[in-house]
Image (spheres, rainbow, N blue to C red):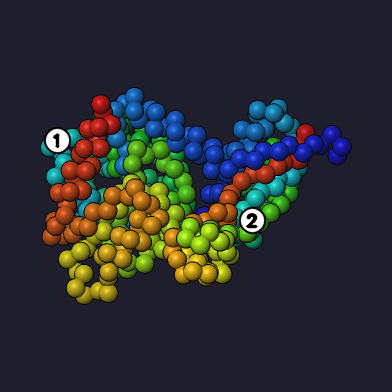
Amino acid sequence: MHELGIVFHIIDSLKEVGEENHLQQIAGVTLEIGEVSGVLEDYLQSCWRWASDRTELLKGAALTVEQIPAVTFCEDCKKTYSTTEFGKTCPYCKSENTYLVTGNEFNIKEITAC
Amino acid sequence: MDKFKVLEIKKSVFSSNEKRADELRNELKDKKLFLLNLMSSPGSGKTTTLTRTIEALKEEIRIGVMEADIDSDVDAKTISDLGVKTIQLHTGGMCHLDAGMTAQGLEGLEADELDLAILENVGNLVCPAEFDTGAVKNAMILSVPEGHDKPLKYPLMFSVCDVVLINKIDVIPYFDFDMEQCKKNILMRNPKAKIIPVSAKTREGMQQWIDWLLDEVKHWKE
């Protein structure tokens, strides 16, 4: 269960944020997740509900996921293209000298809290 | 509800683990203990590789092994018969180990008396790559039957590894395995990766791996 492990890490991070900012309650959490970060939102939501409800700080907190598209840059022709469509090989010049620009993010963007 | 406010956080989900992993590495430096995180898919030849490695080094340095595979393919008895301390870590069905679990494992291993602790991570090429265990170096074993295209399919795993052992080179004639293409695929993801083709079974190439490991352990103690 990859997603459950990740949810535990999100909760640990939020507990730190909670302590640093003297928060009583977090009502909402927004994540930014890259398209090729390998996480399934459905699973993430179920794991989130199960695990967050077992904490005082996050009981009932809603999880919102914003997806970031995966974009790859070609170092040879200097163009960008959709990673999920073309993978590692540049569709313009067929080069494999490419790297991922965005798409593997896994960030806590913001929270709603008091 | 109006007492609620929006706080911008902008931090990686993995940041608390990364912090713990850095702390653990500092502790390891103080204790002069080298931790190797060994990753691979199941069936890549971890047992034989570990056995050969331990046999070659156990007279020279003090070694301990933590096995974390959910359904370990390393026979704990085989390893402990070699005369090194071995413990089984329980991941509770989790697909990876994080820095906190690794730190607990090191306590269980009573690793302060050791020079080298080897963490046999869960047999999986995806999740273990995402969680820094606090190890000094990451190694992975890719075996010939898995195919030379694996670095393309699991890019993150290959990009976090310091050393890649390409194991089972004795069976290359029976597979459509292109060694040069495999090396190219690995270096494309990770130009710094050290690639060592080996056969743990016939021992071909193993000395280069053992020398690398021993050098790293000694260097860490300086």
Residue placed most toward the observer, B79 or A106:
A106
Q: Nearer the viewer, mark 1 or mark 2?
A: 2
Q: What residue type is labelled 1?
A: Glu
**Label drawn at residue A56:** none
Instruction: Left or right? Give the position of B68 relative to B172.
Output: right
Give the position of the C terminus of chain A as an image quadrant.
top right
Which quarter of the figure has residue B103? Answer: top left
**Label drawn at residue B60:** 1
Residue B157, position as x, y percentages in the image: 41, 54
Residue A25, position as x, y percentages in the image: 74, 36
Residue B212, position as x, y percentages in the image: 22, 43
- Residue extending furthest toward the front: A77
Q: How crowded is mark 1: few (under 14 residues within 10 Å), some or many (20 or more)?
A: few
Residue A39 seen in the figure:
no
Residue at 26% over, 65% down: B179
Provide the chain ID for the residue under circle 2. Answer: A
- In the image, residue B111 sits, relative to residue B49, either above or below, namely above
- Residue extending furthest toward the top: B30
Q: What residue type is labelled 2?
A: Ile
Which quarter of the figure has residue B42? Answer: bottom left
- In the image, residue A41 sits, relative to residue B130, either above or below, namely below
Provide the chain ID for the residue under circle 1. Answer: B
Residue at 37% over, 39% down: B135
Q: SS at mark 1? A: loop
Residue A88, position as x, y percentages in the image: 47, 64
Residue at 21% over, 75% down: B174
Q: Residues within 10 Å of mark 2 (few under 14, many from 20)?
A: some
Residues behind callouts 1 and 2 on a single chain? no
**Label drawn at residue A68:** 2
Residue placed most toward the observer, B140 or B192:
B192
